[in-house]
Image (cartoon, grey):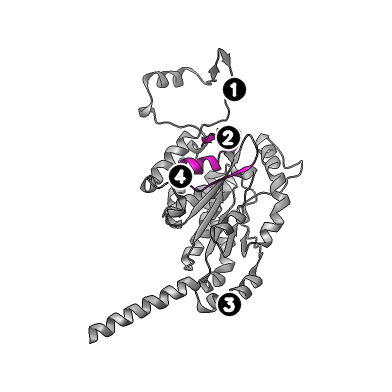
Amino acid sequence: MKTLTFLLCVIMSFSVAKAQENQRKKVGVVLSGGGAKGLAHIGVLKVLEENGVKVDYIAGTSMGAIIGGLYASGYTASELDSIFKNVDTEALLQDYIPRISKSFYEKRNDEIYALQLPFDDFKIGMPAALSKGMYNYNLLSGLLLHVRHERDFNKLAIPFLCIATDIESGKQVILDKGILPQSILASGAFPSLYSPVEIDGKLLIDGGVANNYPIDELRKMGAEIVIGVDVQDGLKNREDIRGASDILLQISNFSMVQDMSRKIRETDIYIKPDIKGYSVISFREGSDIIKKGIEAAAPFTEEFKKMGSPEYINNPPSFREKYKGICVYQG
């Protein structure tokens, strides 16, 4: 009799927990692109974890795709922090291949020639970008070895998608299936810095050109509550444009700025870390940038704690109305 009673209690507890899970509004996280500034995403994810927020969906672009894809595959925010603190930041920006992995001729050519140019059809050309991204691809492939057989990103620990841009049409390409490291690399293939990535016959570059804050795509995945982390730059004035990378960023930001005000309004909790003074290649300052993410998310601690409470589950609209579109700058 006692055994039967115990089993009934277990079944009832499971049923109640399942009912609450069904009632709980699904939480999605959207992570924008921004190069090294996107390391602030790790800080925000740390705060979410510390306050018990269950993330149900992730959508990201460029650096947001890298952080989001790794997090969706099962890494914790603390593990991501450790990974990026130990990455060779110089190698991220070049095709670094260990000397032991090179052939005799590759070693010899590296020692003889300071510059190598492509040669095709008896003509000397110019490289498509500073880096082919091979170091980054090898790094991501190693980190994502545990999900190497998974081709449907909806079946990762957290359903995930990222955005790339078709270089021929300029339209966004949603990547939610395929080879995860390749998709992430395509989403972050910043023009002139990294070579385009070919997937399914399309030549893809950085998703930030077409959609640097994929909130609409996140909603379509099933997210009912959206936490957005935005590390994008606004438009620069002429004094702030000092090089080719600044010009490219300015061009890519034109379309982004036009639609961003709407996306901010549709974000339930909008977090804007103060990453002024950092650039898309400030990987050496990664630890400081991660701290900026923690600082920006900290004011929402109480709101994050409420997300699993009965009060929030039974009355989410008032919560969303109260905190919709909040933008916090820390510095």
Amino acid beneath label 4: Leu
Q: Earlier in the sequence, mark 3 or mark 4?
A: 4
Q: Magenta stretch: give its range.
A: 171-200
Residue picked out by circle 3: 315
Task: Label 1, secondary structure: give it.
Answer: loop
Give the spatial CA distance, label 2 vs label 3: 47 Å
- 2 vs 3, front mark: 3
Q: Quadrant of the N terminus?
A: bottom left
Q: Earlier in the sequence, mark 2 or mark 1?
A: 1
**Other residues around mark 1 within 10 Å, as few (<14) / some (14–19) / many (≥20):** few
What numbered label is drawn on residue 193? 2
Q: Is residue 164 left or right of residue 244?
A: left
Amino acid beneath label 3: Asn
x 49%, y 53%: residue: 160
Residue picked out by circle 4: 180
Where residue 282 appears, as percent x and y from the top left, is 57, 44
- The answer to whether the residue labelled 3 contacts the one labelled 4, judged by CB atoms less than 8 Å apart, is no
Q: Earlier in the sequence, mark 2 or mark 3?
A: 2
What numbered label is drawn on residue 126? 1
Q: Quadrant of the C terminus?
A: bottom right
Task: Label 2, secondary structure: give it.
Answer: loop
Residue 247 covered by magenta stretch: no
Give the spatial CA distance, label 2 vs label 4: 21 Å
Any part of residue 81 in sight: no
Q: Earlier in the sequence, mark 3 or mark 1?
A: 1
Amino acid beneath label 2: Leu
Amino acid beneath label 1: Met
Residue at the far top in the pictured view: 122
Relative to 168, residue 68 above or below: below
Q: Earlier in the sequence, mark 4 or mark 1?
A: 1
Give the spatial CA distance, label 3 vs label 4: 37 Å
